[in-house]
Image: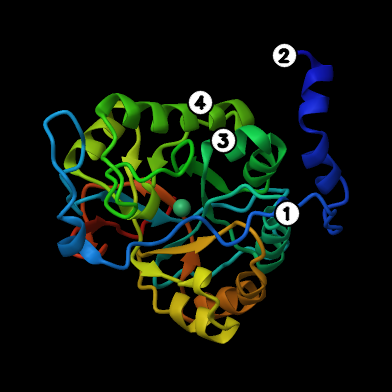
Amino acid sequence: MSKVGHVHGWAIGLAGLVTFGLIVGTAVAHGKPVHRTSPSGPSATATATARPTNVGTVTRHATHARAVSTPARPTGSARPSVSCRNGYVALSFDDGPDPASTPRLLAALRRAGLRATFFDIGQRVAEYRQLAHQTVAYGNAVEDHTWDHRSLTGASTRAPALTARQVIAELDRAKRAIVSATGRRPQFVRPPYGDTSAAVQRLARMLGLIEVGWTVDSNDYTGISTRQLVATVLQVRPGGVVIMHDAGRIPNTLAAIPAIAAGLRARGLCAGRLVPSRSGTPGWEHGTFYAGPAAW
Ligand SMILES: [Zn+2]
């Protein structure tokens, strides 16, 4: 693509980023985050149809990652965390990028000295390339949250499970959009709604992606207060992963960031990045979340 083409394609995103503190009115009416963490648990999702040609056999043995530290970059916060005596946790934000939320969230994280993992939706990355690029430029990771946020197993959406070919397309198309926008290859995938199966995990691995769930659901999409949100997030234990959202209007999530940073500091925890791990601790519902704090 020509440089001119790039500029045209990114015009809206750039307009919102040139002056980072000013949020321009380019927000698409995105509404609430599209991610709905599974409220039903594995017993309910186990009813998903399991056909030989699809990937609907649901399991929850999904995550193979741990949180580790990330060194501050010159472009990062002026005040990186210094005491990580009790280890690391990963803060993750799903469903972006979104002009309504991402610039503000990146600014809030930077001000608080935090870095996070963004599980971005591929088609949104393609639409808002500059926001995904900026997310990485600010020292965060952008990972795979499928191309269009379809349930891969259909468990949460009462839809037929995707075929293996469809799952590969969902994961790979998003992966390629992220590489194109950020220059970084995603290592991890978070299946929308947490709907996964042994087949999904196998297909993800084929594409070089490790599935990641969460150990703490912030419930930020439910409209809970900032105070409740902070209290929920700070339940995270060393090596844990918190899920929040980066989509639409997220005033309580933004307002919670400074208190989350302060709370982690008070507990001797640092926000780290995700890296693959073979050892784990109990985590995501009935599965095993492979997580362990380690310094980078
Ligand atoms: Zn989601």
The answer to whether one can see residue 219 in this image is: yes
Q: Is mark 3 within 8 Å of ligand 1?
A: no
Amino acid at pointer 3: Gln
Between label 1 and label 3, give the one nearer the viewer. Answer: 3
Q: Is residue 181 above or below residue 275?
A: above
Kindly identify which numbered label has been placed on residue 103: 1
Residue topped by disc 2: 1
Element under disc 3 = helix
Describe the colour scheme in one phrase: rainbow
Looking at the rendering, in which quadrant would you find the N terminus?
top right
Between label 3 and label 2, give the one nearer the viewer. Answer: 3
Q: Is mark 2 within 8 Å of ligand 1?
A: no
Separation of marks 3 and 4 at Cα, in angstroms: 10 Å
The answer to whether one can see residue 282 in this image is: no
Q: Is residue 82 left or right of residue 1?
A: left
Separation of marks 4 and 2 at Cα, in angstroms: 15 Å
Residue topped by disc 3: 123
Residue topped by disc 4: 176
Amino acid at pointer 4: Arg
Amino acid at pointer 1: Pro
Of the two numbered discs 4 and 1 on the same chain, state the one appearing first in sequence: 1
Residue ID at (53%, 36%) = 122
Amino acid at pointer 2: Met
Residue 255: where, in percent of width, then height?
Answer: 66, 75
